[in-house]
Image (spheres, rainbow, N blue to C red):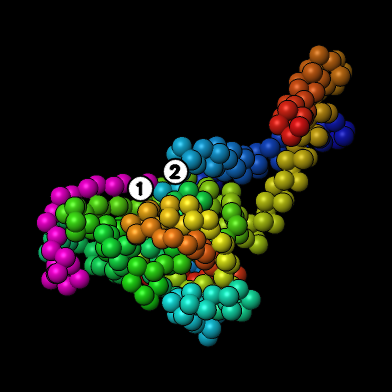
Amino acid sequence: MSWFKLNRNLHRDIGYFCIGMTLVFAISGIALNHIHQFNSNYQVSRVSHQITLDVERIETPEFESQLLQKLALTTPVKARFWQDKNTYKLFLKDTTLYLNPQANTVLVEQVKPRLLLRQLNFLHLNEARAAWMWFSDFYAVLLIYLALSALFMVKGKKGVWGPRGILVLAGFAAPIGFVVYYSS
Amino acid sequence: MKAALISVTLLTIMTLSSNAYSKTFNGGADKSKLVPISTLLSDAQRYTTESATIAGTVTRVCQKRGCWMQIASDKKFQTLMVKVRDGDMVFPMTAQGKTAYATGTVKLIPLSLEQTNARRKAQQLEPVDSPETLHLFTPVAVTIED
């Protein structure tokens, strides 16, 4: 087999192998770039309720069970804490209740990890540590191979030595342009 | 071949959908060094160099990057912020209400009077005449337990 054919075959097969990883990093890359506009890790819902709160009874188990009943919540209270003099917090599984006895309001905040996006971000930010880091390095090496081998996919004028070479130069020019413009 | 591809895809989705994050960071906190948060804050200068482990209910977590969490003190209205560099540890938002143990040291950040009163206003506390110091806990290891 000629080196040209070998290169094309390797480029194709490594390309197939990289599809999964590329999707993981590309989707989570967009999600993390826009994390300030859209929380891709968690779905947070907040609903406010007007409920009369008796500050004298607020720390009693009877009050807690009545409140949970009113809010149709079935999970038990795990922890409680006075955040400040007007905010008493009750923690349930994935739910936090913010009680304001002065305003007689209860804010129910529910946190749910987003299916798939949370896990993709988990991988992108290397929360899995060591093993994933080595696998990511391996993927990066494969990407370098894919980039360089792409230069030799087509021979002659129809390849990078023809007009399409401008595309390669454009790919270098874009990051250089950003560095020159934003770092000066 | 088609069946193998479908199986791999389904297996990947199932794995990714599971509860993937760990509840310990850097091997977990050293529980033999436990110091109540109120004690640590009353002698904060000492713990800028001496390592200690704090424990308490997680009351708030950074929603976007999970780079900080607030831990309730043993004293009413008192909390301590546990802060890491982005990416060093990612605290899950679902840690709220769980018990966190963090081993590390305290960082003291002097605030201006304006900053002090802005913080106190956010905490619905009365303004003061002299600036305060912000205490941040920098952990080297953390354990979060349900």
Nearer to me, B98 or A16? B98
In terms of secondary structure, where does tag 2 sit?
Answer: loop
Q: Is residue B78 visible?
A: yes
* Residue A55 is covered by the magenta coloring: yes
Which residue appears at 61% of the width and 79% of the height? B50
In terms of secondary structure, where does tag 1 sit?
Answer: strand
Left or right, residue B102 beside residue A175: left
Instruction: Locate residue A177: give its quadrant.
Output: top right
Left or right, residue B56 beside residue B22: left
Q: Which residue is mark 1?
A: A44
Question: Would you say the residues marked 2 and 1 are in contact, meaning their CB atoms lie under 8 Å apart?
Answer: yes
| x, y percent for residue A131 | 65, 61
As shown in the figure, which amino acid type bears the numbered disc 1?
A: Val
Q: Which residue is mark 2?
A: A39
Q: Is residue A43 above or below residue B126?
A: above
The subunit carrying tag 2 is A
The part of the chain drawn in magenta is A43-65
